[in-house]
Image (tube, rainbow, N blue to C red):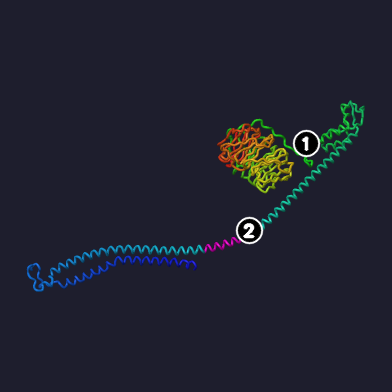
Amino acid sequence: MAGSCGTGGPAAGWKRHIVRQLRQRDRTQKALFLELVPAYNRLLEKAELLARFSEKVQPEPNDVTPATHQDPWEESGPDSDQVPSPATLRVKWQEEEEELQLDCGEMAYQVVVKSAALDALESELEERQSRLATLEARVAQLQEARAQQAWQVNARRARHAAQRAAYEALRAHARLQEAALRKLEEEARDLLERLVQRKARAAAERNLRLERRERAKQARVSQELKKAVKRTVSISENPDTPGDGIKEGVEMTLALPAEPQFLESEADEKWKRSFRSASATSLTLSRCVDVVKGLLDFKKRRGHSIGGVPEQRYQSIPVCVAARLPTWAQDVLDAHLSEVNAVHFGPNSSLLATGGADRLIHLWNVVGGHLEANHTLEGAGGSITSVDFDPSGSQLLAATYNQAAQLWKVGEAQSKETLSGHTDKVTAAKFKLTRHHAVTGSRDRTVKEWDLNRAYCSRTINVLSYCNDVVCGDHVIISGHNDQKIRFWDSRVPRCIQVIPVQGRVTSLSLSQDHLHLLSCSRDDTLKVIDLRVSNIRQVFSADGFKCGSDWTKAVFSPDRSYALAGSCDGALYIWDVNNGKLERSLRGAHCAAVNAVAWCSSGSHVVSTDQARKIVLWH
């Protein structure tokens, strides 16, 4: 009703306007015919008058004398001056008739013209009336549509109000849930801290028990040695005549390995050993004690942790004398279902691992210049961002987007351990030089040290920025971050010992085999060589066309530290000479997408690169 009332005014205005136009047209057309109609009426009157005169003056056949027989000089009589002759009247009437016919023809022509104009105007009027009817129908349709849309708008406003009320209720509920979540997170942190403290106390108690057990064993060994030196030893120069030998009680100890079980079993026996020379009696008690102390001191010098547990180190890896520059692509494979993010050679240079966004790790054998599939490691819960072999080549560690790092034993398809504890994507995972220890970096702004025997986080380092990559030295952990800084951490010191700023976000780090130089790649499209002896940037590498394709683009040293290798977003590999700082070579043609990672085998003979188009390329 409101819509019809609102539109009644405009409709009435349209009608009044059309009526005014019609009246104006009638007045205009009527003005055209105002002169024609009286003239036509006069013409009709004259025609009627002429007809009457014709009837009156029509002569009878006997009375009328032809004018041709009248003498033009004949006098007309006394009334000839007053009454015109019929011939004169006939001529006059003919002239008037001709004029009337002309006027009638002209008027008839004007009537035809006006009739045609009237017909045109009537057709135009009909067309306009039809258009008016169409417009009125359109107006009615639009008014109906407007009324329907107004109803829809009102309905949507009501629905919007209901949804807004529901949204406010959800916001209130979300605030309550966030408060509960924060409370739970605080409780989880408290529980985690308590768990860490409890594990630390358990480790300390275990170390203390081991130390006490070691001391008890050493005390038992000392007691057994004291008992052993008081026993009688038979010494004879001639082994064939034992009865004639000299029996003498000497104080001595035996330089045996410091194994408690062996010493205990030997101490329970009756020691009777024949010697070829009597010089063995020169082993006095003080000399034996010095030998035992030397063995114990040697065992301690081999390396103990604070609690007395020795730190086992990996054996040294053979050093490459000279690396060979790659020149051409020897093998190209579509390795994964999606982009390949990580690649790493094993220590023997014949085993290769690749990890991609398809959550799989493929192991490859380099045989005769080609890559042959070995087997696939499964169990990763997210995209693989980093892979690393331990120096023995028996284990493989991978960082994943599933907020954890996975540990595999080479030869087994399923994951051995899951290092969980990060709250965001893990971007790097590397083995330390000491056995059963690893380091991970994450986007949750932490770097964690792990005890792989217990899958236990032994230390958490909080950083101010995302960590993109880590490398490990003897006691130093080096991390590259999103805030354009490289940080150094000492495993024996709880704080950062050094910070080196660089231009651009750090995407990768590579440590030389002599642990004296560090190669960093950053998003300012440069590579930097840092001399760790003076903690200073020694060289900066760049090239026309080289550009980092992502925040996880990897660059590496050659095994002999003579070259630096990195992949670009245009699919090319760039190799710089570290000695002179010049671009040595660029390799193109094998990749059609951005190169994510590169690896140089420890023997220096092969290079492998991976890209975002699922390809891995073996260069020779």
Residue name at image x 33 percent, y 67 percent: 27
Toward which corner of the image does residue 82 lie, by quadrant? bottom left
Which quarter of the rendering shows the C terminus?
A: top right
Q: Position of residue 101 (x, y in %)?
A: 21, 65
Say the numbered circle drawn on residue 507: none
Q: Position of residue 134 (x, y in %)?
A: 41, 63
Say the numbered circle drawn on residue 302: 1
Is the residue 195 above or below the residue 543 in the image?
A: below
Q: Position of residue 46 (x, y in %)?
A: 21, 70
SS type, badge 1? loop
Q: What kind of secondary structure does the magenta stretch mostly adopt?
A: helix
Is the residue 2 above or below the residue 577 in the image?
A: below
Q: Is residue 425 left or right of residue 139?
A: right
Q: Neighbour class for label 2 at 10 Å: few (<14), some, many (≥20)?
A: few
Nearer the observer: mark 2 or 1; the answer is 2
Q: Is residue 167 magenta?
A: yes
Camera-side residue of 503 and 61: 503
Toward which corner of the image does residue 169 lie, by quadrant? bottom right
Q: Is residue 479 left or right of residue 308?
A: left
**Residue range (magenta):** 151-173
Q: Is residue 577 magenta?
A: no
Q: Position of residue 218 (x, y in %)?
A: 84, 39
Toward which corner of the image does residue 330 lie, by quadrant? top right
Say the numbered circle drawn on residue 171: 2
Residue most toward the bottom?
78
